[in-house]
Amino acid sequence: MKIFFTKVPDPIIRLVIVFGVFFGVILFVRGFVIPKELKEKGIHRTSAIERELASEIHYAGSGICAECHDEEYDLKNEGYHQKLSCEVCHGPAMEHTEEPDDFTPPAPRQRKFCPECHTYNPSRPTGFPQINPVAHNPLRPCIDCHNPHDPKPLTVPRECSACHAQIAITKAGSHHVMLECTVCHDTPDEHKSTPRLIRAGKPVKRDLCASCHDKDSGVKEVPKIDVYTHGEKYVCWQCHSPHMPEVNHE
Ligand code: HEC
Ligand code: HEC
Ligand code: HEC
Ligand code: HEC
Ligand code: HEC
Ligand code: HEC
Ligand code: HEC
Ligand code: HEC
C-alpha cells in the first residue's frame, strides 16, 4: 500500500488492523456492559451522588460560629490560631448550631490535647512553635497560661532553639557546637516576635566561612583550607552542611 508516495511496510499495516479491531471490540462491549447510571454522570454513579447528598452533615464551618460567639471569633482571627477552624478543637458542631441549648460541643481543656500539634517533631515546618510536653511547665493544663483563642507567646523566646529545635539539636552534636547562630545569621531582634514579617539573614558568600577557615585567617584551632583553591566555584555549604560540617579524615 502507498501513502504519500512512500510504501508503508506490511507489518505496520497488520499492527494497525490488530489495534483497530481491539479498540473496536472494547467500544462495542462498553456500550452494553457499563450500567446506565454510570453513563449519566460521567465517572460517578448516580446512586452514589444521591447517597452522599443524603448523608448527615456534621461540620458547620467556622463562619456560622460568629453569629453567636463573636467574641471568641474576633479574638481568634486576630491571633496566632487564626488559621485554625473552631471545629478543629471543638469537634463537629452542626447539631449545636441548630439547637445550641440541647447540644454543646466539648471544649478540650485537658493538657494532652494541645501537644497533638505542638509536640516537638522534626518533620514540622521550620519555625513552627514546638515544645517538649514533658519538660514544658508540666502538670498544669496548657490553658492555665495560654488562651486557646489567642495563644500569645507569654514572653518573647530568648533562644533560637524555641522555634528551630531541629537545627539547634543538630548543631549541638557537631564541630560547630561553640558557634552562636548569630555568627552566621544576621538576625534582627524582631524576628523572634514576628518571624514571618521580619526575616533572619542567611549567608550568601564564601567569605563568611573563610573568615575562620582560610589559611590566612588569624583564628586559632580551626582547620584551615585555601579559600582560593578549595572547592572554588561552589559555596561552602553545597559540600559541607553548615549546621553539621563533616569531613572524611581517612
Ligand atoms: C445559634 C447560636 C449559636 C451558634 C451558631 C453557635 N453557638 Fe456555641 N453556644 C451557643 C449557646 C447559647 C451556648 C451556651 C449553651 C449552654 O451553656 O448550655 C453555646 C456554647 C458553646 C460552647 C461552650 C461549651 C462549654 O463547655 O462551655 C462552645 C465550645 C461552643 N458553643 C462552640 C461553638 C462553635 C464551635 C460554633 C460554630 C461551629 C458554635 N458554638 C455556634 C450558641 C451558639
Ligand atoms: C486551639 C483550640 C481551640 C480553637 C481553635 C477554638 N477553641 Fe474555643 N475553646 C478551646 C478551649 C481549650 C476552651 C476552654 C477554655 C477554658 O475553659 O478556659 C474553649 C472554650 C470555648 C467557649 C466557652 C467559653 C469559654 O471561654 O469557656 C466557646 C463559646 C468557644 N470556645 C468557642 C469557640 C469558637 C466560636 C471558636 C472559633 C472562632 C473557637 N472556640 C476556637 C479551644 C479552642
Ligand atoms: C490543629 C493544630 C493546633 C492545635 C490543636 C493547637 N495549636 Fe497552637 N498553634 C497552631 C498553629 C498553626 C500556630 C501558629 C504557628 C505560626 O504562626 O507559625 C499555633 C500557635 C500557638 C502559639 C504561639 C507560639 C509562638 O510563640 O508563636 C501558642 C502559645 C499555642 N499555639 C498554644 C496552643 C495551645 C495552648 C493549644 C491547646 C489549647 C494549641 N496551641 C492547640 C496549631 C495548633
Ligand atoms: C505555667 C505556665 C505555662 C503552661 C502550663 C504552659 N506554658 Fe507554654 N509557655 C509558657 C511561657 C512562659 C512561654 C514563653 C517561652 C518560655 O519561656 O518557655 C511558653 C511558650 C510556649 C510556646 C511557644 C514556643 C516557645 O518555646 O516559645 C508554645 C507552642 C507553648 N508554650 C505551648 C504550650 C502547650 C502545648 C502547653 C501544654 C502542654 C503549655 N504551653 C503549657 C508558659 C506555659
Ligand atoms: C518565635 C519563633 C522563632 C524564633 C525565636 C526564631 N525564629 Fe527563625 N524563623 C521562624 C520562622 C517561623 C521562620 C520561617 C519564616 C518564613 O518561612 O517565612 C524562620 C526562619 C528563619 C531562617 C530562614 C530564613 C530564610 O529566608 O530562609 C533563619 C536563618 C532563621 N529563622 C534564623 C533564626 C535565628 C538565628 C534565631 C535566633 C537568633 C531565630 N531564627 C529565632 C521562627 C523563629
Ligand atoms: C557556620 C555558620 C552557621 C551557623 C553557626 C548556623 N547556621 Fe543556619 N545556615 C547557615 C547557612 C550557610 C545556611 C544556608 C544553607 C543553604 O542555603 O543550604 C543556613 C540555613 C539556615 C536556615 C534555613 C534553612 C533551613 O534548614 O531551614 C535556618 C532556619 C537556620 N540556618 C537556622 C540556624 C539556627 C537556629 C542556628 C543556631 C542553632 C544556625 N542556623 C547556625 C549557616 C549557619
Ligand atoms: C567563627 C568561626 C567559624 C566560622 C565562621 C565557620 N566555622 Fe567551621 N569550624 C569552626 C571551628 C571552631 C571548627 C571545629 C574545630 C574542632 O572541632 O576542633 C570548625 C569545623 C569545621 C569543619 C571541619 C569538620 C571536621 O569534620 O573536622 C568544616 C568542614 C567547617 N567547619 C565548615 C564550615 C563552613 C562551611 C562554614 C561556613 C558556613 C564555617 N565552617 C564557618 C569555626 C568556624
Ligand atoms: C566541592 C565541594 C567542597 C566545597 C565547595 C568546599 N569543600 Fe571543604 N572539603 C571538601 C572535602 C571533600 C573535604 C575533605 C577532603 C580534604 O581535606 O580536601 C573538605 C575539607 C574541608 C575542611 C577540613 C580541612 C582539614 O584539614 O581538616 C574544612 C575546614 C573545609 N573543607 C572548609 C570549607 C570551606 C570554608 C569552604 C568554602 C570556602 C569549603 N570547605 C568548600 C569539599 C568541599
Image (tube, rainbow, N blue to C red):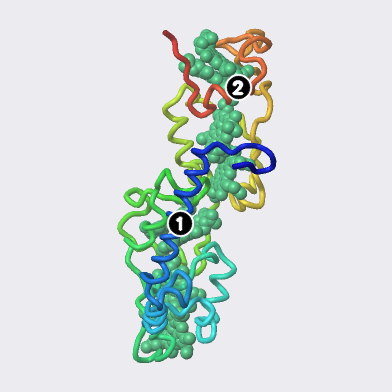
Q: Is residue 240 visible?
A: yes
Which residue is at a point 38% across and 71% down the rendered structure image? 32
Q: Which residue is denoted by mark 2 in the rendering? A: 236
Mark in front: 2 vs 1:
1
Instruction: Point out residue 124 in the picture as x, y percentages from the top left corner.
Output: 45, 48
For ligand 8, tell me if the residue under mark 2 lies within 8 Å: yes
- Name the image quarter holding residue 96: bottom left
**Residue 106 or residue 42, whichever sits in front:** 42
Type of amino acid under label 2: Cys
Type of amino acid under label 1: Phe
Q: Which residue is denoted by mark 1 in the rendering? A: 23
Residue at the far front in the pictured view: 1
Q: Is residue 112 above or below residue 235?
A: below
Ranked by sequence position, the earlier of labels 2 and 1 is 1
**Residue 54 or residue 11, whichever sits in front:** 11
Which class describes the residues within 10 Å of circle 2: few (<14), some (14-19), or many (20+)? Answer: many
